[in-house]
Amino acid sequence: MLGKVFKAYDIRAIYPKPLNEKLAWQIGYAAGQFLTGEAAEAGYDDPMMRHVVVGHDMRVSSPALSESLKQGIRDFGAHVVDVGLVDTPFVSFAINHLGCCGGVQVTASHNPANYNGFKISRTHARPIGMTTGLDEIRRYAAMIDRDKHTARNGREDTRDLWDAYRQHALQDLDASLLEGSATLKIVIDASNGMAGTMVPRVFADVRGLQITKVNFDNSTGTFVHEPNPLVEANLQQVRDTVLEVGADLGICFDGDADRCMVVDENADIVGCDLLTAWLSQNMLRRYPRSSIVYDLRSSKSLPEMITEAGGRPVRSRVGHVFMKQKMADHDAAFGGELSGHFYFRSNFYTDSGAMALVEIVSALVRAGVPLSTLIKPARRYAQSGEINFETDDPQAAMDELKETYADGVIDELDGVTVDMGPWWCNVRPSNTEPLLRLNLEAQDRETMDARIAEVSECLGRRVDK
């Protein structure tokens, strides 16, 4: 069963089969063993380094899985700090705020309601992926038999950190919004997820934000629409509401509120690479010559605009594990990923949906012009968006792509990237589905359409999602 629930970046599966309370206990025991052992090997001797933060989302199965996970941690002999019903970035904050050896959030992020899982972080909320600890946790869990072990009786404490979290999340909010001397009308779709808890707890007293709430009820653990803002259909409610109330922008969060997508005052979707390009200008005014991390699928306009603003663009593999590592390696001030993760040096190099909202509304109110106007300079090229393909042999398809465009500049940082000058593309295997994903950009739409048709011949059968 363990092999079915461990993924590249986290643990996630359908509840109660294959993921259930029995596996949650094993995973808790193994996580306690790994996190405390790593902290001890690193030479940490603070007593808090025997503590693991645990939070959970609003899914119906989350409380039971959380209890079993915590019991496993305590049976190993580590101590638990339970922070309760929280968004995923809250756990990253709590790890650093309390100085713990790591943390676990019980969540399945954007997956349907019958899924659940665990996101695990180590000291300083550094990411854990399959090659950076998750495989060891899986091996530890496989060796644990609850009926044959001796419980070591770790302690459990409950902590309410919402006041500290709110202060942290709002640290860069423009004072005019906090005081109400400037106002913005915004629509927030919480997707019936953890933003329905986080937004009222963090932003309720921000006098300058007039928030229209959509899908804030997360009490039933069910979703009006899938809590995945990357799917365009899931943005329809926020787009309609922006036009209905005449809002300055709309924002849609995913299930655990660590990702978001934005629409402008015209209800047009703003790509996260273009949003990163705009926000980078503001960030570089505050932190000149800083590094900005971006994922390699992003528009070329993003590194161009970072360079033009005097910053240092840093290209990263796709995925929060890699983005966070690049952020730390380069002491980057900011980072953005096409999936809607936004990363901040002031947030321990990790992502935060709440801080992304703060950065967006602060930059918008300072500019004093519509969001569409601010994003327009980043719309330099024609972009395909992500196109999916089914193929029996993904590696053979990528090899054919390299052979077909051998006269271009090719790199394999993540999948295959081909740069032909007037156009470029990236093709990479999905980490979660048996698909190849194509992103292609060109100088104009005509060239883009022609190249998509050409490249598609190498990749298999196109799948519309």
Image (cartoon, grey):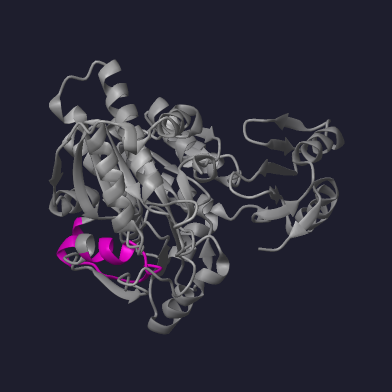
Which range of residues does the magenta coloring cover? 175-200
Q: Is residue 256 visible?
A: yes
Q: Position of residue 32 (x, y in %)?
A: 29, 33
Q: Is residue 310 visible?
A: no
**Magenta stretch encompasses residue 355:** no
Q: Position of residue 164 (x, y in %)?
A: 15, 48
Q: Position of residue 423 (x, y in %)?
A: 74, 45
Which residue is found at the position 44% from the left and 75% from the top? 224
Q: Quadrant location of residue 238? A: bottom left
User: For the image shown, how many numbered marks are present on the structure?
Assistant: 0
* Left or right of 318 in this view: 71: left
Q: Nearer the viewer, residue 371 or 150?
A: 150
* 321 lies above or below 33: below
* Left or right of 9 in this view: 214: left
Q: Position of residue 162 (x, y in %)?
A: 17, 54
Q: Nearer the viewer, residue 393 or 445?
A: 393
Residue that protrudes farthest toward the bottom in the picture: 244
* 288 lies above or below 351: above
Which residue is found at the position 53% from the left and 50% from the top? 338
Q: Nearer the viewer, residue 442 or 122?
A: 122
Which residue is found at the position 51% from the left and 41% from the top? 319
Residue that protrudes farthest toward the front in the picture: 148
Q: Nearer the viewer, residue 307 or 225?
A: 225
Quarter of the picture containing the C terminus is bottom right
